Image (spheres, rainbow, N blue to C red):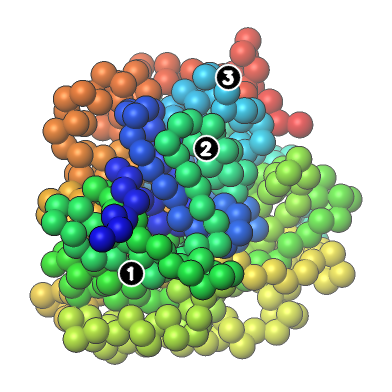
Amino acid sequence: MAHNEAVDVVLVGAGIMSATLAVLLKELDPAIKLEVVELMDSGAAESSNPWNNAGTGHAGLCELNYTPQAADGTVDIKKAVHINTQFEVSKQFWSYLTKKGTFGSCKSFISPVPHLSFVQGDSGVSFLKERFDVLHKHHAFSDMEYTEDKAKMAEWMPLMMPGRSPDEVLAATRVMNGTDVNFGALTNQLLKHLTSAPDTQVKYCKRVTGLKRNGADWTVSIKDVNSGSTREVDAKFVFLGAGGAALPLLQASGIEESKGFGGFPISGQWLRCDNPEVVKQHQAKVYSQAAVGSPPMSVPHLDTRVVDGKKSLLFGPYAGFTTKFLKHGSFMDLPLSVRAGNIGPMLAVAKNNMDLTKYLVSEVMQSMEQRLDSLRRFYPEAKAEDWRLEVAGQRVQIIKKDPKKGGILQFGTELVSAKDGSLAALLGASPGASVTVSIMLELIEKCFPAKAKGEWAGKLAEIFPAREKVLETDAALYRKINAQNNIALELVEESSETPSYA
Ligand SMILES: Cc1cc2nc3c(=O)[nH]c(=O)nc-3n(C[C@H](O)[C@H](O)[C@H](O)COP(=O)(O)OP(=O)(O)OC[C@H]3O[C@@H](n4cnc5c(N)ncnc54)[C@H](O)[C@@H]3O)c2cc1C
């Protein structure tokens, strides 16, 4: 009987998650044999594509939904601090690779862009002031500036101030040290770096169609999307980095831990502007507050994007509903994911989230003029002819069992792994690509615990001199690591603390 090909690791999908994990594993064990299997004809063709996501290097500097306000007015900064330190962990990995010399330039994927929060009305202003008062005392946010002065806001956001009523109540915060990240360029750079190493393959136009247990290993069925031919590969470890399509593959694995999960796909659209006269007047990512009752991913923002050396502006996102799990997926994705084990949680979520459904329907029904009205809250003098509508990537939010409610909708990410550590899947979408490295380190600790504490510990400490927990509490160490990362990634001039954006 013919034997299947055998590798140590199969990674499904060539997005930022698989590319990061593959490069990390190869750094930790250069002899590891691995194969990345991708459905499309290139890397980063789904959510990791630069135009399918907002490219915000999420560090909690501007996203108001990371600092919720309690009924008594107090603002909780825990989530913002955690995401900030996770982003520093990502920066440590990218700095390590950039310093190697063979990885290529960091300028292709990360650019300094100030991060601002912008609020309107008395309650928005009092929230932002409270948030600033708490946040800027923490070492990760000590450079944050706050203003209610419109002249200063005109300096910070020259595009956004003309055309406003003098009575408008406004406030803003700014952190100069924010970033725009082209996650597509980063993914492709990681994949290119990967394939320069021995025993690694990235195979395009191949769809993983099945997974079955084979003793302690897995047999992965792979179909060539052009010829229709299939092959089987045996792997000791499988990572389902298939983005929105990770859920059906997790279900196909049949592992106990997959039971009860469902997916709720939310699509998105942006307004995009490439007019250089408009683009040059805005050098920032400006985040505001989501409308009451709308989900966290609908927080509106007006962003400078830097993609392939060119600057554009992006505004949105406008959410929408579809039954596809990938932008290039099938309308049958959602119905085919219904199982006896997840129908209860899915129905409970449908029943308990009517507001979300109504919100998504209203977003889908919007006319271009209504979309421009939302933009004009940010940029009152926006002209329709400068903006065009683009389709963003898909986010599949996690539905899981809940003892009280039957099922809940979760807006974060969740790593689901087999008890024996032989398979892991990443579900969910937010805060996403920015914190990929932390998520993949969590995967390594969960699925390869003995190696992470043993033979890989030295290399892990070399790549990551400081992890999230210590960065959250040790101000001196945070400043040192942050300064080193910013210099290595060319976000500041070596001799100064000033961001080096053009
Ligand atoms: C609208 C929007 C805005 C966002 N904004 C930000 C942001 O500002 N900052 C941020 O950090 N994150 C952001 N994110 C999140 C971020 O884009 C994602 O978390 C990240 O790109 C997910 O990467 P991935 O590798 O898991 O998935 P993907 O990039 O989607 O890659 C999955 C890959 O798997 C392939 N695949 C699927 N099924 C199969 C199969 N059966 N066989 C083989 N291949 C398969 C797909 O073709 C795809 O290439 C945003 C996401 C969206 C949708």
> Label 1 crowding class (10 Å Cα cut-off): few <14, some 14-19, many 20+?
some
Is label 1 in contact with label 2 (beta carbons under 8 Å)?
no
Is label 1 in contact with label 3 (beta carbons under 8 Å)?
no
Q: Residue 5, can we see it? A: yes
Q: Amino acid at mark 2?
A: Thr
Between disc 1 and disc 3, whose residue precedes?
A: 3
The residue located at (89%, 50%) in the rendering is 277
Q: Quadrant of residue 475?
A: top left
Q: Which residue is mark 1?
A: 210
- What kind of element bears circle 3? loop
The image shows residue 446 at horizontal and vertical percentages of 19, 44
Q: Amino acid at mark 1?
A: Gly
Left or right of 144 in this view: 8: left
| 284 relative to 404, above or below | above
> Label 2 crowding class (10 Å Cα cut-off): few <14, some 14-19, many 20+?
some
Q: Amino acid at mark 3?
A: Gly
